[in-house]
Image (cartoon, helix red, strand yellow):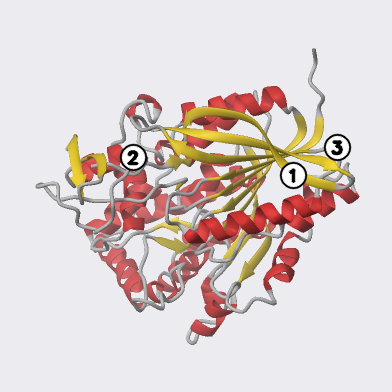
Amino acid sequence: MQKYRHNWLIIFVIHDFEGDSHIGNIDKIIKDEIKSTGLVSSHAFLLIQKSITHPRSTEIQTVVKVLREISGGNYDLVEINKQYFDFHSERGWFKLLRWVNDNFPANHICLNVLSHGAAFGILGDEITRVDSEGVLTTGQDVKFGRTAFIEKRFIHSGSTDAVVYTEGEEDYCKTIQMLWFSELSEAIRDAFNGQKLDILILNNCYVQSFETGWILCDQVRYLVAPEAWFTSFGYNYEQLLKNLNANPQITPEELLANFINEFKKKWKKRPGNLELIGISIVDLIFYNEMKRYFDLIATILVNMSDQEIRMIVQARQQRIDNVSNLPPDFHSGSVRVAMIDLIYFYEVLVDLFPERVDLYNNISEFSIIFRRALIGQYVGGEYIKSDAVLEKKFNLHGVSVFLPFNTEESKFNDVVNCAYFGKPVIDKIRGNAIPLFLFTHQSQWDDFVLKYLKND
């Protein structure tokens, strides 16, 4: 029997872990918005949420709920399925999304993910480290379902049993619990039989990176995501559903036309919620054009002399350091990260090497295409207040790129460095490739990064 084909399928995935009150607060707000608004029968809304972690594996029991009218205009999220799957693997996501596609086929698909993020991956669990004696170095409990470091049993405070590993770069990269975008891309392709997601909306920090767009562009049309922190409580899902209800045949372009303004409208009455936000909407169809010029620019950089590379390093330290894609951290002063706004970096290159016509021309062509690809952006007030020297929006233009500090050590940078240079377990990524293999294999940017780090 053929399944009813909806016009829009809205999939909402929430991944949290114990003690994360931030995700919990967003979770409640979003659920309340969804149930109070409802959705006409020509569309379908699925909520997929982590329930419990299997006590002796990486699989997680996941609850699937559908939004249904239960009586006279009153809606609720009704449980329809439970299943175990690996939240952090391509295989697990293929299993989940194939079930969704088999049971809820649709003309248009919008996938939303709410969890933590780190530039090239999402759904990351807490990272807990131990020293060679098995003593916690972070002071946090180790629990199943969190990143593990030497395979042995470890008892913390006499109550928590877990598998842990000694800290080391190779072990760390092998065991990190993260769904890389390379894995998500392949899962989407196979589960939906080549049908693109019309919209991917990410409530995850730092994930609007050029590398992410490169990896997802064949499977996703529009990417809505933060270039920097995302401290607000989600997008305006109430208005999203109202727009779907008002026009059941609405197109992806119409659905996104006022997305940024609706987001601002939702949060403008709550002081502080918009201050540290830098989000953008990018049409990934332009990536095939942008890839060409991006790689031409990277090739020019790779062929520069060590002296020229050191000029870039110095500029990074003196100028770009002050406008990286994070605002000040009010607990510990300013924060440096491994990502940098791509357009701003290109502007710095033009200033540093005015005689390089080839560099200028390729950057100009890239910038023209990128302006067409960027269909929406919001940069919060705190960025603007902090931008005392530079002229605009803390120099956030909508997409970041990997350019690390050689000496920087942080949880975030550990993760993104693993994505570029780590060695994950074989069955995590096909062929034992690094998570960004598609990007690093096709692009010269990683070669430039290595040359940059040698001169840092």
Local packing at callout 2 (Cα closer than 10 Å; few below 14, some 14-19, many 20+) is some
- Whether 273 is drawn above or below 24: the answer is below
| Residue 165 can be seen in this image | yes
The spot of residue 194 in percent (x, y) is: 65, 26
Q: Is 331 left, or right, of 96 in this rendering?
A: left
Q: Earlier in the sequence, mark 2 or mark 1?
A: 1
Label 2, label 1: how many angstroms apart (C-alpha)? 31 Å
The spot of residue 157 in percent (x, y) is: 20, 51
Q: Find residue 89 and report its image quarter.
A: top left
Q: Earlier in the sequence, mark 2 or mark 3?
A: 3
Residue at the front extreme of this rendering: 158
Q: Which residue is identified by label 1?
A: 76
Label 3, label 1: how many angstroms apart (C-alpha)? 14 Å
Q: Tell me which amino acid carries mark 2.
A: Phe
Q: Residue at x 67, y 52 (%)?
A: 31
Q: Quadrant of the C terminus?
A: bottom left
Q: Is 84 left, or right, of 268 in this rendering?
A: left
Which numbered dot is residue 144?
A: 2
Label 2, label 3: how many angstroms apart (C-alpha)? 40 Å
Which one is nearer the viewer's eye here, 254 or 323?
254
Q: Which residue is identified by label 3?
A: 41
Residue at the top extreme of this rendering: 1
| Residue 354 can be seen in this image | no
Q: Find residue 161 and report its image quarter.
A: top left
